[in-house]
Amino acid sequence: MSWIDIGSLDDVPLRGARLVKTRAGCVAVFRTGAAQVFAASNACPHKGGPLSEGIVHGTRVTCPLHNWVFDLETGTALGEEARITTYPVRIENGRILIDATALGQRSAA
């Protein structure tokens, strides 16, 4: 894995999200706990809702358009046959790092 710095942990509110623009497209970064962060595609596969504007609860996010709920650890939509792409992230010295290799495998949005 090749890690790139995408910002400070403090830039993402607790139980909130931020949108990060990358060369491969936009990625939603979710903070579910004091030091628990997930990254996933921003668009809901149902109607393209912006997941970064959804409600973060536990390790899940609810789409703001039609209430589909996604598990941020697996990308699976609960009760639906759909999923979002998730990306490996880690926190190092208060900075959020995302796997550039995984991003590179994604087609541009």
Image: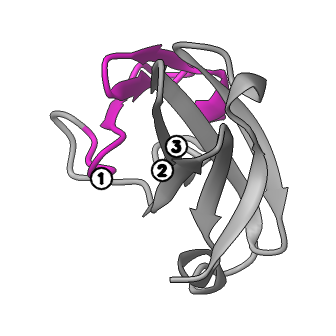
The kind of residue tagged 1 is Ala
- Residue 106 is left or right of residue 63, and the answer is right
Residue labelled with disc 3: 44
Marks 3/2: CA–CA distance: 4 Å
Is residue 49 visible to us here? no
Q: Identify the residue at the far left of this view.
A: 79
The kind of residue tagged 2 is Pro
Residue labelled with disc 1: 82
Marks 1/2: CA–CA distance: 7 Å
Residue labelled with disc 2: 45
* Along the viewing direction, whichever of 47 and 5 lies nearer the viewer: 5
Q: Considering only vertical position in the picture, is 11 above or below 13?
A: below
Q: Is residue 53 magenta?
A: yes
- Residue 69, picture quadrant: top left
Question: N-terminal of the two: label 1 or label 3?
Answer: 3
Mark 3 residue element: loop
